[in-house]
Amino acid sequence: MESYILISYLNDFIFCPRSIYFHNIYGNYSKKNYHNEAQTKGRIAHKVIEENKFSTKKNIITNMEVYSERYNIFGKIDIYDSDNKILIERKRKIIKIYDGYRYQMYAQYYCMTEMGFDIQKLVFHSLSDNKRYHIHIPSKKEKQEFENVIEEIKSYNLRNEFKANKEKCKQCIYNGLCDYNLSIETCLV
């Protein structure tokens, strides 16, 4: 039996494939032990969705669990507006739309369409500046890229060749735990 992949792992995997390993090790510990300030602020900003306090309108669905049998992925969406057929992913602060963000949104889109929901628009909402970023429904090429990432996650092994990215390592909450960090220690000072 093949296990499911968490939708959030798509963004994490693109940031650093090794981070999923650390997520699983520290998953049962309090996030206070390893989250940085930005992640803590993001979690607090996201609380209104998790507690289903965003809206009382019938057409607004929040914090719904979604899954795809086709891709063996599952997770939760932030907001779906059924009247306007818009899927919205909220982020505390969006500087740019990273590939990991897109793949996370595509995963939610594929899950929901497989579950029978009609989605016409995909939107990221930046909470810190109240800006919206529209992305298009994935093209055939983007669907293939998404499927390739799913396969990479399924086949990833910590023993695979890995090249650390010093800029990403500086931002990684696990950089003090990662053995690859030792080789770029001077980059983190």
Image (spheres, grey):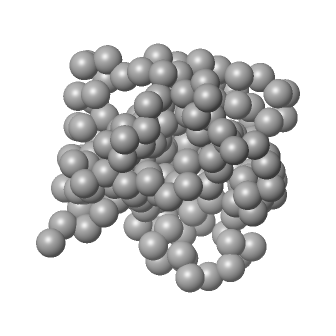
Task: Name the residue at 24% across, 38% down.
Answer: 147
Q: Is residue 90 left or right of residue 68?
A: right
Where in the figure is residue 64, as x and y percent of width and height? 56, 55
Q: Between residue 81 and residue 70, name the one nearer to us.
A: 81
Where in the figure is residue 83, as x and y percent of width and height? 61, 29
Q: Between residue 135 and residue 34, name the one nearer to us.
A: 135
Task: Name the residue at 15% across, 72% down.
Answer: 1
Q: Is residue 83 left or right of residue 156?
A: right
One can see residue 64 in this view: yes
Task: Name the residue at 55% across, 27% down.
Answer: 85
Q: Quadrant of residue 146?
A: top left
Where in the figure is residue 34, as x and y percent of width and height? 67, 69
Where in the figure is residue 128, as x and y percent of width and height? 84, 35
Q: Quadrant of residue 106?
A: top left
Q: Residue furthest bottom?
A: 28
- Residue 100 sits above or below residue 136 on the image: below
Q: Between residue 155 and residue 104, name the one nearer to us.
A: 104
